[in-house]
């Protein structure tokens, strides 16, 4: 198969799909309504790095990433609980795991897409999608009409394009936690490696990034779905960090000044049934599977989806056979990651969490 493809969403999933499909001979058009990457920091390991390596994006990304070979767990007083090594890639030039800001990842993917002359339209989305026997006719909000061989829904957890597949809006499941994220300047005692700290109700991490930034996150337990006043995010996040008797954490807590670069969202999850498609509209990334962040696998799964989708459509003459292979290669793997990620929203002890997370990460080591 070759032809024109409409990709809705210019985030990790959408830009990766555009690059992968362009390299396979397709002509992708990406429409991105907002343009600015959402979120703060993220990380992923060997399989996603290998996919990006195939797309010519891994090595540029390493220049904007912090490299780790293991994950450290400590309790709320800073006592070490566990060290979990990250599995190494079979490609000697790739590290085991990287952490970067979302802005850095977006920059690398956007630069690679531009080098391939991908048509990326910011501030644009679709207003009409009409399924045809061999494609999709689309009217875009910039007034253009075109026919595409297929449409990729890569517009995130609250995807509107997914409604074309599911027949209407879907309800995401609240997982009993909320996630705090903050990009902060490095403190003077910045540690040489990132670390995750555990208390009975909060899991929080501090991970150094490039450009003198550090990524702090915390997942906090809630009995009901919370709402936070955005004007008070700094004050409220400061109270979350107060529960850790670790000098480094308190050093960062003292740096909080207002709510700049601090975000909060309830953790919600969703998994589309097989197939992630209706007609010639297919969902990938968060639109197909919204995960909790405990395995750090949301971006990785989006990259994998995009890489595998491009591989499937390029090696099959027909859409139906390409979609069958795509689902055969993605559904079981993603379902296991989804279930493992969600199960980590609850733990009886810090030791149990570290053990269960190490077991769950084995799924991510499987080949694509």
Image (cartoon, rainbow, N blue to C red):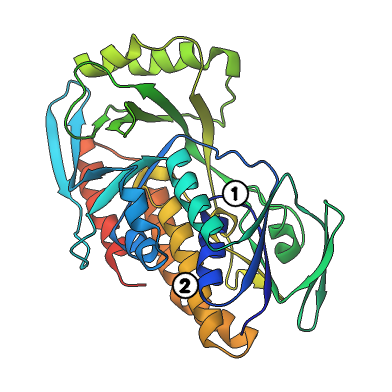
On the rendered structure, is 290 left or right of 277?
left
Q: Position of residue 258 (x, y in %)?
A: 49, 10
Q: Is residue 193 left or right of residue 320?
A: left
Q: Which residue is mark 2?
A: 308
Marks 2 and 1 sit apart, C-alpha to C-alpha, by 20 Å
Residue nearest the observer in this picture, 69 or 144? 144
Mark 1 burial class by Cα count in 10 Å: few <14, some 14-19, many 20+: some
Q: Is residue 202 visible?
A: no
Q: Residue at x 63, y 89 (%)?
A: 318
Q: Quadrant of residue 52?
A: bottom left
Q: Element type at marker 1?
A: loop
Residue 329 in the image: state x and y as whole percent. Answer: 44, 76
Rendered residue at 41%/44% (across/down): 293
Percent across and percent down for residue 291 are: 47, 50
Q: Residues within 10 Å of mark 2 (few under 14, many from 20)?
A: many
Residue 179 horizontal/vertical position (percent): 46, 32
Q: Which mark is residue 322?
A: none
């Amino acid at each position: 198969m070759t032809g024109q493809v409409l990709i809705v969403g210019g985030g990790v999933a959408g830009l990766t799909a555009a690059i992968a499909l362009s390299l396979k001979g397709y002509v992708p058009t990406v429409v991105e309504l907002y343009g600015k990457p959402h979120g703060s920091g993220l990380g992923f390991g060997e399989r996603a790095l290998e996919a990006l390596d195939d797309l010519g994006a891994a090595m540029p990304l390493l220049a904007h990433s912090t490299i780790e070979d293991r994950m450290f767990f400590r309790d709320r007083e800073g006592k070490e609980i566990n060290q979990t090594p990250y599995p190494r890639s079979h490609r000697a030039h790739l590290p085991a795991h990287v952490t970067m800001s979302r802005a850095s990842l977006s920059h690398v993917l956007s630069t690679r897409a531009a080098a391939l002359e991908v048509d990326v339209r910011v501030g644009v989305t679709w207003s009409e999608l009409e399924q045809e026997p061999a494609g999709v006719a689309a009217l875009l909000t910039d007034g253009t009409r075109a026919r595409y061989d297929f449409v990729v829904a890569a517009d995130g957890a609250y995807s509107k394009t997914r409604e074309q597949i599911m027949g209407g809006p879907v309800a995401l499941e609240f997982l009993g936690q909320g996630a705090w994220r903050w990009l902060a300047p490095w403190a003077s005692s910045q540690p040489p490696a990132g670390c995750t700290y555990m208390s009975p109700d909060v899991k929080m991490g501090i991970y150094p990034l490039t450009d003198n930034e550090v990524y702090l996150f915390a997942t906090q337990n809630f009995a009901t779905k919370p709402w936070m006043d955005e004007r008070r995010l700094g004050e409220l996040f400061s109270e979350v960090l107060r529960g850790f008797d670790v000098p480094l954490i308190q050093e960062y807590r003292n740096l909080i000044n207002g709510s700049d670069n601090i975000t909060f969202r309830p953790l919600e999850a969703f998994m589309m049934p097989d197939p992630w498609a209706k007609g010639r509209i297919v969902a990938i990334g968060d639109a197909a599977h919204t995960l909790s962040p405990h395995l750090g696998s949301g971006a990785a799964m989006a990259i994998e989806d995009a890489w595998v989708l491009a591989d499937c459509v390029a090696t099959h003459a027909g859409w139906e056979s390409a979609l069958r292979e795509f689902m055969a290669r993605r559904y079981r793997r993603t379902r296991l990651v989804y279930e493992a990620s969600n199960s980590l929203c609850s733990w009886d002890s810090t030791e149990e969490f570290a053990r269960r997370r190490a077991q769950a990460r084995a799924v991510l080591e499987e080949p694509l």
